[in-house]
Image (cartoon, rainbow, N blue to C red):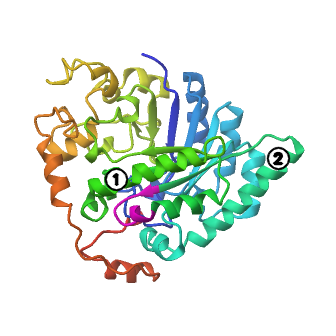
């Protein structure tokens, strides 16, 4: 079994934002269940020894952890390339400098839209203005590092696309371009966690997706050699499923805030599976011996038509979590696949959500006011108790 290439460290589920498409589980880990600093530093060292190259510090909002700089420094000492995935809320100019000094290699800053009103409506919090300010600070660091020849921090902007913002994608790309990122990730919402609960409000139509693909293609051509653009399309409009996380337990592993080791963000939804905890076992043992990581490796578990399909080494039968969430069986062929016996579930969902209902006015308000205003339209992510 090859070694994992990346470790996703969900260091907390706490978050000041309430994004309606959040990939976190509906049942969130509370603060008193979170791993201690020493546990995370040990995990980073074990990950490096196992062959991991990339560390993604995420959440929730990782900035909610006051020990984040210590974690970044520990990851650097373990020779891991460290990426901070953040909303930016809680990051001051001084704290950013502290992270860069500690050895942060890359920062990925999320955006919900191109202007404050719609962005804050989607996030359920007034955060857009600070994101713009933070992007300017990151740019200042990059310019100074370029002038002095110091190690340069890389900068990615991430935009989650869905029915409520997709029609002005060109405007959003232009707004992100003005922030001078190295990379732009245009990621359509993936329907797990809170996004699945809000699917009727978020799933774009096929016509919307086709226009978005054309807009991104034009932007890629215009920005070639200046900004790299990556696009993640929604499964529901694909002919075949994605190789989720590069295949179950094949390329990466995720540690949740309480220390459970999972093959992906959503694996915890699958009933009857036990995910070993890094408090009880070394990371190498979990990767190599854990029953959860062995469960869907290889091809022995595959039903037909996956087992005899020529694509089985490309998509590995699709996403196990999506298969369970849509069919009730984690061993089923991902219904996204046009060859899946239950593909009609995807066709039915696309047809059902093809016509948009009334949309509440996008407006800035307190979180509780937004909850009341959008009740019955979508559910905002809540914070762990």
On the image, the x and y values in percent for residue 369 come to 39, 83
Query: What segment is highlighted magenta in the picture?
Result: 160-168
Is any part of residue 26 visible from this angle?
Answer: no
Q: Residues within 10 Å of mark 1 (few under 14, many from 20)?
A: many
Whether the magenta-drawn stretch holds residue 161 is answered as yes
Q: Above or below — where is 273 with respect to 310?
A: below
Which mark is on residue 209?
Answer: 1
Q: Compare residues 70 and 199 and report the one nearer the observer.
A: 199
Q: Is residue 353 visible?
A: yes
Q: Residues within 10 Å of mark 2 (few under 14, many from 20)?
A: some
The quarter of the image holding the C terminus is bottom left
Q: Which residue is mark 2?
A: 145
The CA span between labels 1 and 2 is: 39 Å
User: Residue 7, labelled with which disc?
Assistant: none
What residue is shown at x 25% (from left), y 77% (from top)? Answer: 358
Residue 99: image x %, image y %? 72, 50
Give coordinates of residue 342: x percent, y percent: 11, 39
Residue at image coords 22%, 72%: 357
Instruction: Tell me: 4 left or right of 208.
Output: right
Q: Is residue 71 magenta?
A: no
């Amino acid at each position: 079994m090859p070694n994992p290439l990346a470790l996703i460290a969900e260091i907390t589920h706490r978050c000041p934002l309430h994004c309606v498409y959040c990939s976190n589980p509906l049942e969130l880990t509370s603060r008193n269940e979170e791993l201690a600093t020493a546990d995370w530093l040990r995990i980073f060292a074990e990950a490096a020894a196992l062959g991991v190259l990339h560390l993604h510090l995420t959440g929730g909002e990782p900035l909610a952890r006051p020990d984040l700089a210590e974690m970044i420094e520990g990851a650097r000492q373990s020779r891991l390339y460290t990426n901070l995935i953040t909303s930016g809320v809680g990051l001051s100019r001084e704290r950013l400098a502290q992270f860069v000094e500690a050895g942060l290699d890359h920062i990925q800053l999320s955006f919900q839209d191109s202007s404050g009103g719609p962005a804050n409506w989607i996030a359920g919090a007034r955060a857009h203005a600070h994101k713009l300010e933070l992007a300017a600070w990151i740019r200042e660091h990059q310019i100074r590092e370029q002038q002095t020849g110091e190690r340069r921090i890389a900068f990615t902007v991430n935009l989650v696309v869905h029915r409520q913002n997709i029609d002005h994608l060109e405007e959003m790309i232009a707004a992100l371009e003005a922030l001078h990122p190295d990379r732009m990730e245009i990621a359509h919402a993936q329907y797990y966690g809170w996004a699945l609960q809000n699917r009727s409000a978020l799933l774009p139509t096929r016509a919307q997706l086709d226009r978005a693909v054309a807009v991104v293609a034009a932007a890629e051509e215009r920005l070639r050699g200046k900004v790299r653009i990556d696009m993640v399309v929604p499964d529901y409009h694909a002919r075949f499923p994605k190789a989720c996380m590069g295949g179950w337990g094949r390329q990466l592993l995720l540690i949740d805030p309480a220390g459970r080791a999972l093959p992906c963000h959503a694996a915890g939804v699958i009933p009857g599976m036990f995910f070993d905890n890094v408090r009880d076992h070394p990371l190498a043992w979990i990767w190599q011996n854990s029953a959860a990581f062995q469960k869907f490796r290889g091809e022995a578990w595959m039903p037909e038509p996956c087992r005899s399909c020529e694509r089985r080494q490309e998509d590995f039968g699709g996403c196990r979590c999506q298969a369970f969430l849509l069919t009730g069986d984690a061993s089923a062929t991902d219904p996204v696949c046009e060859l899946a016996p239950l593909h009609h579930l995807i066709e039915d969902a696309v047809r059902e959500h093809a016509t948009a209902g009334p949309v509440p006015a996008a407006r800035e308000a307190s979180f509780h006011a937004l909850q009341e205003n959008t009740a019955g339209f979508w559910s905002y992510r809540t914070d762990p108790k």
